[in-house]
């Protein structure tokens, strides 16, 4: 195994869901599945949702996309990507996930688009 990487899993959260909770959960489940694979390969996976969603709830958000949600959701991910070693982009279209990839590149982080390309994950 190579040195473990802290890898932000960036995928769609709301994109393409019409804010349907079942579809949003399917997007989260896809990111969680990838996080588990990364963990089992020896890396430290992270999702922005793990940080943002509890804070959003605690701060009193009443619905996805309200002012409290917008204050926290993407800003947490922006801060988090700067702390990670790499970003893995998964899933379909997502402006937010694409922004995380761009920020990762701007910060000199590794960017992967396939699990198999990550060291130790072949």
Image (tube, rainbow, N blue to C red):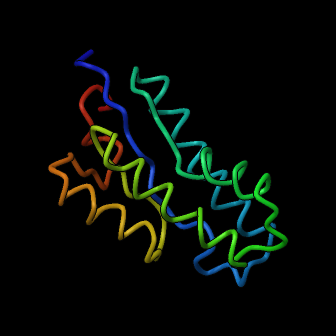
* Residue 52, percent from left and from top: 62, 53
* Residue 10, percent from left and from top: 44, 56
**Residue located 36% across and 62% down the image:** 100
The reply, left or right, for residue 44 in relation to residue 66 is left
Residue most toward the top?
A: 1
**Residue located 61% across and 81% down the image:** 16
The reply, left or right, for residue 1 in relation to residue 90 is left
Residue most toward the left?
A: 108
Q: Nearer the viewer, residue 64 or 17?
A: 64
Q: Nearer the viewer, residue 3 or 109?
A: 109
The reply, left or right, for residue 52 in relation to residue 43 is right
Q: Nearer the viewer, residue 87 or 29?
A: 87
The reply, left or right, for residue 89 in relation to residue 67 is left
Q: Is residue 26 above or below residue 70?
A: above
Residue most toward the bottom?
A: 18
**Residue located 31% across and 22% down the image:** 4
Which of the 4 quarters of the picture holds residue 73? bottom right
* Residue 80, percent from left and from top: 42, 47
* Residue 5, percent from left and from top: 31, 29
């Amino acid at each position: 195994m190579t040195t473990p990487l802290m890898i932000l899993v960036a995928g769609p959260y709301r994109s393409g869901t019409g804010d349907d909770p079942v579809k949003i959960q399917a997007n989260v489940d896809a990111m969680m599945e990838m996080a588990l694979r990364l963990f089992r390969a020896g890396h430290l996976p992270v999702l922005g949702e793990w940080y943002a969603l509890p804070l959003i709830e605690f701060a009193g958000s009443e619905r996805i996309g309200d002012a409290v949600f917008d204050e926290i959701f993407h800003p947490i991910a922006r801060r988090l990507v700067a702390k990670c070693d790499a970003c893995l982009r998964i899933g379909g279209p997502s402006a937010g996930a694409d922004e995380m990839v761009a920020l990762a590149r701007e910060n000199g982080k590794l960017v992967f688009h396939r699990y198999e390309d990550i060291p130790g994950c072949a």
